[in-house]
Amino acid sequence: MSLFLDAAWGKNTERAPIWIMRQAGRYLPEYRALKEKYSFWELCRTPELARLVTLQPIERFPLDAAILFQDIMTPLPPMGVDIDFRPGPVFENPIRSAAMVDTLRVPETGEIAPYVPEAIKLIRADSPVPLIGFGGAPLTLATYMIQGGGSKDYEEFRQFLRLEPQAAHKLLDKLTEVSIRYLKMQIEAGAQAIQLFDSWAGLHDTKTYAEFALPYNKRVFEALADLDIPRLYIAVNALHLYKEIETLPCEVVSIDWRAPIDVVRPQLGGKTVQGNLDPAVLLASKEIITREAERVLRSGLGGAHIFNLGHGIMKQTNPEHLAHLVETVQAFDRRRARESLGC
Ligand code: CP3
C-alpha cells in the first residue's frame, strides 16, 4: 500500500500524503517547453507524451501520488462535439437545444479515448507512486457543453437548466453513461484511484444541485463501487452543499479553502478530507507558505487527511515554492502535533 491510498481508504496516517491539483501544467518550465512543440490535444492523445507530462512533477518533487495528464473534456469528442483549447476548452457548437442533445452519441468504451489506457499502462510501468485517474462530473461537463466554454456567470447554462430541464436531464444521463465507461476503462488499465471534478457545482443552490448533480454523481460512484479503488470528489465553493455531498458513495471529499477542515469534517460522515490550502498562498513567501500549510495540517488532525490545494495550482506559481510546500507537509509529524495540542 502507499500513504496516499491508506489515507484515501480512511487511515489516519502518521503524516499527511500530498499531491497537488493540476500538478502537471503551465507553472512548470519543462511543461511549457513541450507546449512549444505540441498542441494540448497532441500532448493528451500521444501516450508517450501524456506519460512524460504526468511524470514531470513526480520527477521534480517527492509527491505522494501522480494524476493522469488529460482533461475533463477528453471523453467528449466521440459523442460528436468539437473542442479546441485556447487555453481553456472552447466548443465549436455549444449544445443549445433539446434536438442537439438528441444528436449526441453515447460511444462504446472502445471508441472513447483509446490512447488513455495506453498512457496509463506506460505511466504505471514507470511511476514510483500511485496513479490517480479522473473525469469531470456530469453537471460540470454539461456546464461547458452548453455554455460553450469558460464564463463568469454561465448564464446560457443556467437558463437552459430552467427552460429545458428535460433535455438537461437527457444530456446528464448521456454524460453519466460515457463517464462510467471512461472511468472503468481507466481503472482496468491501472488507475489506482479516481477523482471526479465537479468544478462548477457550487454555482447552484442546494435544490438545483440535488436535482441535477447528486443523482448522476451517485450513479458514477456506484458503478465503480466493486472495483476496489478509492473514489474522490471535489466541488468548489460548495459550503452549502455538504449535506448532499455527505450522501455520495465516495471515500474522499476535497474541500476548497473557504472554511477550515475541522469545521467541515463533522459534516462529511467520516470520509477522508482532502485539501485545503488556498492556491494563492503559493504566490506569497516561503515563510507564509510554512505558516499557512501548518495551519491546514493542524486543522486536519481530527481524522484522515490528504494534503492538497483547495483548487488547481496557479500558472504564476514559482516551482520552488511548491518544493518548499511539499517539504513542509512531509516534515509535519501528525502524532507529535496532536500530543503538543493535547488532542
Ligand atoms: O492535474 C493535472 O496535472 C492533470 C491534468 C488536468 C488538466 N485539466 C490539464 C490541463 C486536470 C486534472 C484537468 C482538469 C480540468 N480541466 C478541470 C477540473 C479541475 C478544475 O480546475 O476545476 C477543468 C474545469 C478543466 C477545463 C479546463 N482545461 C480549463 C478551465 C482549462 C484552462 C486552462 C487552465 O490551465 O486552467 C483547461 C486547459 C488545460 N487542462 C491545461 C492543462 C495543463 C492548460 C492548457 C495549455 O497548456 O495551454
Image (cartoon, rainbow, N blue to C red):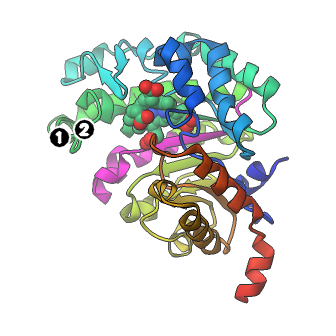
Judge depth for marks 1 and 2 and give the one in front: 2
Q: Amino acid at mark 2?
A: Ser
Quadrant housing the C terminus: bottom right
Residue 208 x %, y %: 29, 51
Residue at 81% over, 66% down: 14
Residue 231 x %, y %: 63, 45
Residue at 43% over, 20% down: 76
Residue 229 x %, y %: 71, 41
| Residue segment shown in magenta | 190-219
Q: Is-magenta flag for residue 200?
A: yes
- 273 or 320, nearer to the observer: 320
Residue 7 x %, y %: 73, 57
Helix, strand or loop under label 1: helix
Residue 93 drawn above or below residue 73: above
- Distance in Å between CA atoms under marks 1 and 2: 8 Å
Read off the residue under disc 2.
151
Residue 80 drawn above or below residue 246: above
Residue at 69% over, 61% down: 329
Q: Which residue sits furthest right?
A: 1
Q: Which residue sits furthest bottom?
A: 342
Q: Amino acid at mark 1?
A: Glu
- 9 or 224, nearer to the observer: 9
